[in-house]
Amino acid sequence: MNISNVHRTALSLLVGAALATGFAAPAAARDRQDNPHAKKHEQADAAHDRAEAQQRRAQAIQQAHRAQADARQDAARQREAQHAAQHDAQRAAAERRDAANRQREAQAQAARHADEAREAQARARQERAAQARNDHARDLQRREAVERDARIAAARRDAQSREARERDARADAVRDRVYRQQAQERNRQQQLDRQRISRVEQQRRIARQQQQAAQYRRYLEQRQAQEQFRARELQHARRMAQYRYQQQYYQRMNLQRQRMLARRYDYASDPYFYTPDSYRYSYAGNWYQTNRYGADMLRQAVNDGYAEGIRAGRADRQDGWRNDYRNAFAYQDADYGYNGYYVSQSDYAYYFRQGFQRGYQDGYYSRDQYGRYDDNGSATILQAVLAAILNLQPLG
């Protein structure tokens, strides 16, 4: 109900009350003219009617006011309902928009996921393709490496075969040359043996050798004090490996001295004393001569020195000592293997030290540059090194 309807209802009530009062007034007037008591009664009725009319007008006004209030309440409720409906509509619209936005976001996210999945698949395909290419390239490289190694191995085998053939040919040529030289040397030595030196020269050589052997015996007897002094030095320096080696060297030298002192030498039956000189050699700027027996003693000096040098070098390496072959007692002594005959002690010592120096280097650095050494203690210097050290030159 709106405001205009309420106004019309109140107006109709007022009009109805006025009409009822107008209709009742003429009838009351006529009755008053006929009867005075009735006039009073009519006046009372009229007052009563007016009171009722006023009451009715008041009621009508109250009803109109109530109607207006109800109308206003209805209008307020209607406006509230309209506002609620608008709010509900706006909320529904907002929810629809939110739902639409969520749907669009879900669709967009689904699209992104689809794009990411496609990109991941594309990357996976690319990675598989790259891996396949890499595998193929590695296979090719491996095959090429195998083929290259096979070619290199074949070439190396061919080269080794050629080198072996050439080495064998050179060895055969060397053997032939050595055989011829040895045959020539045997013939020459046989001729020299047949020649012999004079009796006078033989006696001079024997006398010289006897004097040399006697001097060497005295030297051996005087050397023991020096051996003991060196042993104490090594113990004090805690060079125990070198100490043990030196003690072994002393033992070998003592056995050598005992054999020498016990030997009864037969000069007349020793071919050294009647065989003419067949070689010459030099060191320290001087030239010397000897026969093949003296040459063999010089070879023995180099070989014995090489063997002792290896033992001394290994001992210093075990002790953590510096490379110092000149400090070794065996190098300073340089007498092992010497018996006082055929060559002088100084000649033997010189060539012993030449072999010792090279053996010491091989032993200290654990190598086989100048010769060979086996576990049984046997050492042999290389023939080429031996020949270069001695440099023996045939006479005549």
Image (cartoon, rainbow, N blue to C red):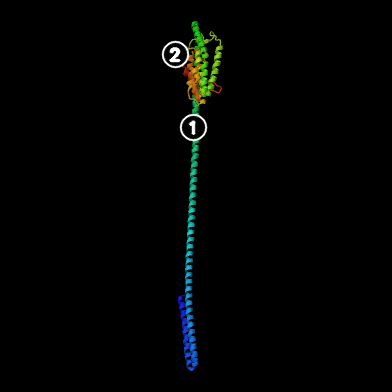
Residue 242 higher or lower than 44, as above or below: above
Q: Position of residue 127 (x, y in %)?
A: 49, 46
Give the crowd class for mark 1: few <14, some 14-19, many >=20 residues within 10 Å: few
Tell me if I can see residue 294 in this picture.
yes
Q: Position of residue 349 (x, y in %)?
A: 49, 16
Q: What secondary structure is found at the residue carrying circle 2?
A: strand
Q: Residue furthest bottom?
A: 34
Q: Residue furthest top?
A: 200
* Kind of residue at disc 1: Ile
Earlier residue among tags 2 and 1: 1
The disc at residue 287 is 2
Residue 250 higher or lower than 88, as above or below: above
Contact (Cβ within 8 Å) of mark 2 with mark 1: no
Q: What secondary structure is found at the residue carrying circle 1?
A: helix
Q: Which of 230 and 86 is in front in this view?
A: 230
Give the crowd class for mark 2: few <14, some 14-19, many >=20 residues within 10 Å: few
Q: Where is residue 261 in the image (x, y as percent from the top left)?
A: 55, 12
The disc at residue 12 is none
Residue 135 higher or lower than 380, as above or below: below
Q: Name the residue under label 1.
A: 152
Q: Nearer the viewer, residue 184 or 231?
A: 231
Q: Between marks 2 and 1, how big is the CA–CA gap?
A: 53 Å
Q: Where is residue 147 in the image (x, y as percent from the top left)?
A: 50, 35
Q: Nearer the viewer, residue 163 or 326?
A: 326
